[in-house]
Image: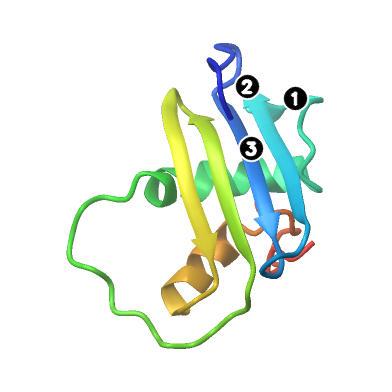
Amino acid sequence: MTGTADPQYDVDLTIRLTETPGGPEYTFRLQAGDGTSSPASTVPDPAAALDAVRRHGEAIFFPKPGPPPLCTQQYGGPQTAVVTGTYLGREVNCRFSRTDGCEIARWHSMAPLLGGSAGSTGAV
């Protein structure tokens, strides 16, 4: 996402999802202000996506420095997503994948934002 954020929206995110390497890219948007999503939102379930962002966005988009977490070495699939835009006036540029247990947990917490429904894997 380029340009300046619209000040009436405290959430303005663009999500680019790819399910397989070299596969088609799906693009979604979540835009919200005053606790509700705008008509410009194109994620499948804007209310669930906004809830996930409100619940987990601060920790996921702006993680606090610290030692790297210990993650299980499991593979959750080839999906990747890139989220850009603004959240509460801060610039977001965050990459998601499903390459290990920690990444899978991040993906699940934000699945509605990544094109899935609440509780899903995020796959389209």
Please, what secondary structure does the residue beneath circle 2 have?
Answer: strand
Asked if labels 1 and 2 touch by Cβ distance under 8 angstroms, the answer is yes
Please name the amino acid that badge 3 sits on: Thr
10 Å crowding of disc 3: few (<14), some (14-19), many (20+): many
Residue 6 location (% of width, % of height): 59, 13
Nearest to viewer (mark 3 / mark 1):
3
Q: Residue at x 52, y 59 (%)?
A: 96
**3 or 1: tag closer to the N-terminus:** 3
**Residue under circle 2?**
33
Q: Is residue 83 left or right of residue 116?
A: left
In which quadrant will I find the N terminus?
top right
**Residue under circle 3?**
14
Residue 49 visible in the displayed image:
yes
Q: Nearer the viewer, residue 51 or 101?
A: 101
Q: Is residue 8 above or below residue 118?
A: above
Measured in 3D between alpha carbons, the distance from the residue under mark 3 to the one under mark 2, in whole angstroms, is 15 Å
Q: Residue at x 32, y 50 (%)?
A: 63
Please name the amino acid that badge 1 sits on: Ser
**3 or 2: tag closer to the N-terminus:** 3
Residue 39 location (% of width, % of height): 81, 25
How many marks do you count on the picture?
A: 3
Q: Which mark is residue 94?
A: none
10 Å crowding of disc 1: few (<14), some (14-19), many (20+): some
Residue 118 location (% of width, % of height): 71, 59
Residue 112 visible in the displayed image:
no
Please, what secondary structure does the residue beneath circle 1 have?
Answer: loop
Residue sticking out furthest to the front: 22
Asked if labels 1 and 3 touch by Cβ distance under 8 angstroms, the answer is no
Q: Residue at x 46, y 79 (%)?
A: 100
